[in-house]
Image (cartoon, rainbow, N blue to C red):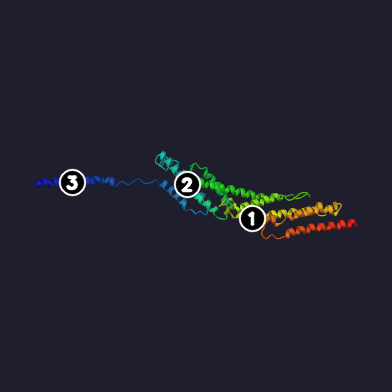
Amino acid sequence: MKAIKIGLAIVVIGAIAFFVIKSLGSTNELEEIPPSKNAFVERIKNEIGSIKTHPNSEFNKSIYTDIKYLIDDHYKPHPPQHPYGRLGETQGENDQRKDILSRDLYSAYANKFLEQAFYVFNNTSWKSKDLAFIRREYKALQDSPYLESGNALNTKFEDIKRIFNKYDEINRFISSCNKFSYPTNPALKDTFPIDDVRSKLNQVTTYRNTRLGNSYLNNCERLHIALNAIPQNLYDKHFKYLDNKIDAWSGMFEAYNSQKTYTDNVYTPFKNEIELLDNTLYQIPELPNVKYNHLMKKWNKDASNAYDYFSNKQN
């Protein structure tokens, strides 16, 4: 009986040992190494990840171009080792990984580009070369097949579009003010286009009061400087017009048969024109009266000459 019990114990212990060894697997299974990752894919992933570390203070399109070249190059067949390309073991795998890597590259670069673009917009110095790059690049990224509808990137691209639309509008306005024209050889009946000037000065005030119509655009120091210069520029054009007109019509009193006729038809109408050159219209801080006084002195001298002429004529 004792021998039977001992035998049963041995059998049980043996069975337990068998199942323990079986659960651990064979020696060959323990020595198996997991399949290695694709080194080419991993390199590209690391390059894409490095985009995030680039500073926002400078644009670097070359990193995008270089990584895109790597993807395209590794995707191409390289026989005999990589007949389907280096990104996968089959053509389907190669195609799939190229698409995934291209989308990841687009997403990483587009997000970094937006950070860099709004870094410019949030500062006061908007360099022309930076604006040209942003304008060109956002349009290219917006037209990419990798940009899906509903993606948050679309909102940022639309923000950039609005910034440039308003930026171009204000620059066109500034240019129209700088090119503002007036008669250079004015006839006596000609007048300086005051209504047009008033309209432009009102527009300057509107831009100022609305912070240029865009919070980002309001940061652009160059636009503020150009807008602030408009009243003085228009004032100077107005002065030049009046000065030229005085030169053209001085001494014309001889064409009139009396002092009163000259005064009513020449002196007084033009004196009224000169008086429009005041700060009520232009509202330039601390505007000196030098130019206004210069004009009045010249025109009053002509009136004095007219008085002498008609007095001598009566004698």
Residue at point 86% right, 58% down?
Answer: 308
Contact, mark 3 vs mark 2 (Cβ under 8 Å) = no
Q: Is residue 29 visible?
A: yes
Q: Earlier in the sequence, mark 2 or mark 1?
A: 2
Left or right: residue 243 versus residue 56 is right
Query: SS of the residue at dot 2?
Result: helix
Tell me the kind of residue under disc 2.
Ser
Query: SS of the residue at dot 1?
Result: helix
- Mark 3 burial class by Cα count in 10 Å: few <14, some 14-19, many 20+: few
**Mark drawn on residue 107:** 2
Q: Earlier in the sequence, mark 3 or mark 2?
A: 3
Residue 77 or residue 138, whichever sits in front: 138
Residue at point 58% right, 48% down?
Answer: 164
In front of the other: label 1 or label 3? 1
- Mark 1 burial class by Cα count in 10 Å: few <14, some 14-19, many 20+: some
Q: Quadrant of residue 274?
A: bottom right
Tell me the kind of residue under disc 1.
Asn
Q: Position of residue 137 (x, y in %)?
A: 54, 47
In front of the other: label 2 or label 1? 1
Q: Position of residue 241 (x, y in %)?
A: 74, 53
Residue 270 or residue 101, whichever sits in front: 270
Tell me the kind of residue under disc 3.
Gly
Contact, mark 2 vs mark 1 (Cβ under 8 Å) = no
Q: Which residue is mark 1?
A: 228
Q: Which residue is mark 3?
A: 14
